[in-house]
């Protein structure tokens, strides 16, 4: 070894911490500490919300809460069954309308879109994503509630939620499709597979985890929307499966309960919030379960 | 770009072997092939013949357009956005660039193996092999297992995977095995011609040796064109060699084409000799 200093001097150099080393070590410590604190604070906020909602909401949960309809003001008891069913029905409507449109738009943008039209589509998707949901509500109210049906209805709620769903699905699916490596597309095309089949059978299945995540994310987001539903589905004290009639929804029910002066209703608002969280968590758990099952197939 | 004085001449398009000697019949006849990426021309006026049931190697330094050239032979070049090609590539007398020709059909006859092994990650080994058949509906019920086994045997992969081929993912194999899987996948659709774009550049020497051995077996049945930056590989596996070069204008041209033995021992062109002897590239 062609070191200029004798070995002993090098060893002492290694062992003796230099002042600038201490500075660097200190900076490292501070930086590490900061990111750990951020992570802890972030998780703490989430845990606090979950715990607070759970503590306040659990007392409201009983069999009647899930099976009965809300009672008139002042009466103690009843439940939010119409709201649970209404939310599920309107989410299903939103999914049936919004997910195919969102995935289709994403395929266009990621696989075909080039030039001015694609840029315009992309810009409009961003625009809709940034639209305050009350604006979506006003629009759907003017269209489906006032002009087409004539009164508040669940279908209008579903359509409003679909408009919330479309840009989220489009963006997440588009990102996922762009992550599918081009060599896979080329491998398929080089086998003599047409472009559309390559997309349907190779690109989409490869991206299915991301697509599922996007769909669940968008439905979770739509499931918590209140403003567009107030103007479209309105809410309903009675049990109704008719999409053309006013329909109850959990967020609207929570809103109505939370601003009421009755302690029983306030507890029920917490209970509603709790099951909304559980519903969304279950939705994402379900999608993960489907994914792992499909993946583990022969 | 290349650190050697090269006399600026008009690019030589050597008369194809089949015309000068009584060599094997040409299967693919390329005439005046040009290709572009956007406004940049990548290759210019390439003309050569690819002999049936022989191996034709395309060599040349990086950026000489050899990959672009080979991708023009099954119309994969135009898959890249803004890329286009012009000229004539006749396969059994039919110009694959004729308006009536569907590029999808061309690719079923002219298969391709890529530089990096690209098995479909969400599929098993079996699913990978039969992917082309299933996607194109080119099979009869009941024969698919036999076809898959045949392709895997032909790609010299059968013995290594026969116990797990319907369970293990294609991505679980080693790099060399993945590349042979990709060859099996290409063979399964029964192409006439197989294009290989640096098929060994991502593999270790032993895996490379196995692929080269495989190429020697496959030429009994298929017409093969292989791009390689490895001159030893070209001299080992090929019967004919084309040397391409891009000079200052960055447009790839064919410098010399002929029997591999001649290109490597007694090239006509000074630039070929410089490249073969390692003076540049």
Image (spheres, coloured by chain):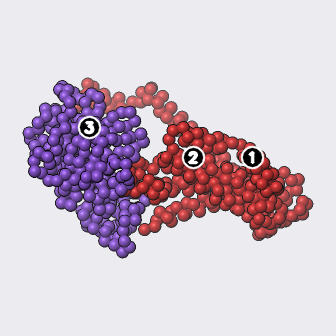
Chain colours: A red, B purple
Q: Which mark is residue A139?
A: 1
- Picture mark count: 3
Q: Residues within 10 Å of mark 2 (few under 14, many from 20)?
A: many
Residue A118 location, quadrant: top right
Which residue is located at x 81 percent, y 51 percent? A146
- Residue A109 as seen in the image, left or right of residue A217: left
Q: Position of residue B3 (x, y in %)?
A: 21, 27
Q: Chain of mark 3?
A: B
Nearest the viewer among B9 and B246 is B9
Element at badge 3? strand
Residue B210 location, quadrant: bottom left
Q: Residues within 10 Å of mark 3 (few under 14, many from 20)?
A: some
Q: Position of residue A290 (x, y in %)?
A: 54, 64
Nearest the viewer among B260 and B94 is B94
Q: CA distance from mark 3 to mark 1?
A: 60 Å
Q: Is residue A14 above or below residue B33?
A: above
Which residue is located at x 26 percent, y 58 percent? B192
Both marks 2 and 3 on one chain: no
Q: Which mark is residue A74?
A: none
Query: Marks 2 and 3: which is nearer the front?
Result: 3
Q: Position of residue B198 (x, y in %)?
A: 27, 47
- The residue at which mark 2 appears reads as A171
Element at badge 1? helix
- Residue A121 as seen in the image, left or right of residue A77: left
Q: Is residue B127 above or below residue A260?
A: below
Q: Position of residue A228 (x, y in %)?
A: 75, 50
Which residue is located at x 59 percent, y 56 percent? A100
Q: Residues within 10 Å of mark 1 (few under 14, many from 20)?
A: some
Q: Which mark is residue B45?
A: 3
Query: Marks 2 and 1: which is nearer the front?
Result: 1
Viewport quadrant of the C terminus of chain A: bottom left
């Amino acid at each position: 070894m062609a070191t200029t200093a004798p070995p002993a001097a090098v060893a002492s150099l290694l062992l003796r911490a230099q002042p600038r080393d201490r500075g660097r070590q200190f900076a490292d410590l501070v930086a590490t500490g900061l990111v750990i604190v951020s992570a802890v604070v972030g998780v703490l906020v989430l845990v606090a919300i979950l715990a607070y909602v759970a503590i306040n909401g659990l007392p409201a949960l009983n069999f009647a809460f899930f099976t009965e309809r809300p009672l008139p003001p002042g009466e103690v008891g009843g439940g939010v069954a119409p709201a649970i069913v209404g939310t599920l029905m309107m989410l299903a409507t939103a999914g049936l309308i919004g997910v195919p449109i969102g995935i289709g738009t994403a395929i266009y943008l990621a696989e075909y879109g080039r030039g001015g039209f694609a840029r315009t589509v992309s810009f409009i998707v961003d625009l809709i994503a940034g639209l305050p949901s009350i604006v979506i509500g006003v629009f759907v109210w003017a269209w489906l509630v006032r002009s087409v049906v004539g009164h508040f209805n669940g279908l209008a709620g579903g359509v409003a939620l679909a408009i919330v769903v479309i840009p989220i699905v489009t963006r997440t699916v588009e990102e996922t499709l762009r992550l599918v490596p081009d060599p896979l597309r080329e491998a398929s095309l080089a086998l003599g597979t047409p472009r559309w089949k390559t997309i349907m059978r190779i690109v989409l299945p490869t991206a299915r985890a991301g697509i599922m995540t996007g769909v669940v994310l968008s439905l979770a987001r739509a499931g918590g929307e209140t403003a567009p539903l107030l103007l479209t589905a309105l809410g309903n004290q009675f049990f109704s499966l008719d999409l053309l009639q006013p329909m109850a929804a959990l967020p609207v029910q929570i809103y109505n309960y939370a601003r009421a002066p009755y302690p029983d209703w306030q507890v029920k608002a917490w209970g509603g919030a709790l099951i909304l969280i559980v519903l969304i968590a279950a939705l994402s758990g379900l999608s993960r379960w489907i994914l792992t099952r499909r993946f583990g197939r022969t | 770009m290349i650190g050697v004085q090269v006399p600026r001449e008009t690019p030589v398009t050597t008369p194809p072997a089949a015309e000068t000697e009584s060599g094997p019949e040409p299967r693919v006849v390329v005439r005046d092939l040009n290709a572009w990426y956007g406004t940049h021309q990548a290759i210019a006026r390439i003309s050569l013949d690819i002999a049936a049931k022989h191996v034709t190697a395309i060599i040349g330094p990086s950026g000489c357009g050899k990959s672009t050239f080979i991708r023009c032979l099954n119309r994969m070049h135009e898959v890249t956005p803004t890329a286009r090609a012009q000229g004539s590539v006749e396969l059994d007398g039919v110009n694959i660039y004729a308006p009536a020709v569907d590029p999808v059909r061309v690719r079923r006859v002219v298969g391709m193996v890529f530089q990096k092994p690209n098995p479909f990650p969400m599929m098993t080994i079996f699913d990978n092999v039969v992917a082309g058949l299933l996607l194109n509906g080119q099979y009869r019920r009941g024969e698919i297992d036999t076809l898959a086994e045949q392709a895997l045997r032909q790609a010299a992969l059968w013995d290594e995977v026969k116990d797990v081929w319907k369970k293990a993912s294609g991505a679980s194999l080693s790099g060399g095995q993945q590349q042979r899987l990709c060859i099996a996948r290409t063979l399964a659709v029964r192409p006439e011609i197989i294009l290989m774009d640096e098929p060994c550049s991502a593999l270790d020497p032993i895996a490379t040796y196995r692929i080269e051995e495989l190429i020697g077996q496959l030429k009994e049945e298929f017409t093969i064109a292989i791009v390689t930056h490895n001159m030893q590989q070209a001299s080992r596996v090929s019967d004919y060699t084309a040397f391409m070069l891009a000079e200052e204008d960055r447009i790839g041209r064919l410098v010399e084409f002929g029997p591999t033995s001649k290109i490597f021992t007694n090239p006509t062109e000074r630039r070929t000799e410089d490249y073969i002897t390692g003076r540049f590239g």
